[in-house]
Amino acid sequence: MQDVTSPTNSANREFVAFRVGSQEFCIDIMGVREIRGWTQATPLPHAPSYVRGVINLRGAVLPIVDLAMRFGLGLTEPTARSVIIVVQVQQQVIGLLVDAVSDILTVSEASMQPTPDIASDLAKTFVKGVYAIDGRMISIVALDCVLPVIAKAAA
């Protein structure tokens, strides 16, 4: 577990860090319900390209979103290290397919850098900030924007 805190700032948050392709991202740990190994998803007809399908999670139907595809990084080819991060986005529970979970980070809110102005509007939609930790650049994913249609319907 990485502890990147400042003794003068008491507003610390915990994030789950993960890899999608060669990039590192993180999400607030408070939105994470569980982390599980990759399970083959049943495809849904006419679903968006980033929705891999659905799986049965203890009797509940769980949609699986391929984050690489959602971010425009190409289709993920699941491996033994691939995982599904089960998250709650407003009232919807979804699974996020990622290449691997790498860390639990404890960071101060003051150390978050804004998304650079040079980034595209689409990048700013998904990334709400960046942490620079030990030479790594870790983008913070805005979970509310992963499934905007569902998020708006649940509000």
Image (cartoon, rainbow, N blue to C red):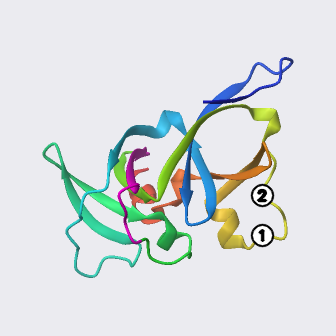
Instruction: Look at 23% across and 74% down and name the residue there.
Output: 44
Residue segment shown in magenta:
77-90
Identify which amino acid the numbered label 1 is placed on: Ala
Mark 1: few/some/many CA within 10 Å (<14, 14-19, 20+): few
Q: Tell me the residue that label 1 is attached to.
A: 119
| Front-most of residues 50 and 153 | 50
Q: Is residue 96 above or below residue 31?
A: below
Whole-Å distance between the Cαs marked 2 and 1? 7 Å
Q: Are marks 2 and 1 in contact (CB under 8 Å)?
A: yes
Q: Quadrant of residue 16?
A: top right
Q: Position of residue 116 (x, y in %)?
A: 83, 61
Label 1's element? Answer: loop
Q: Which residue is mark 2?
A: 115
What residue is drawn where x is 37% and y is 66%? 78
12 or 135, which is in the foreground?
135
Q: Is residue 118 left or right of residue 94?
A: right
Quarter occupied by residue 150: bottom left
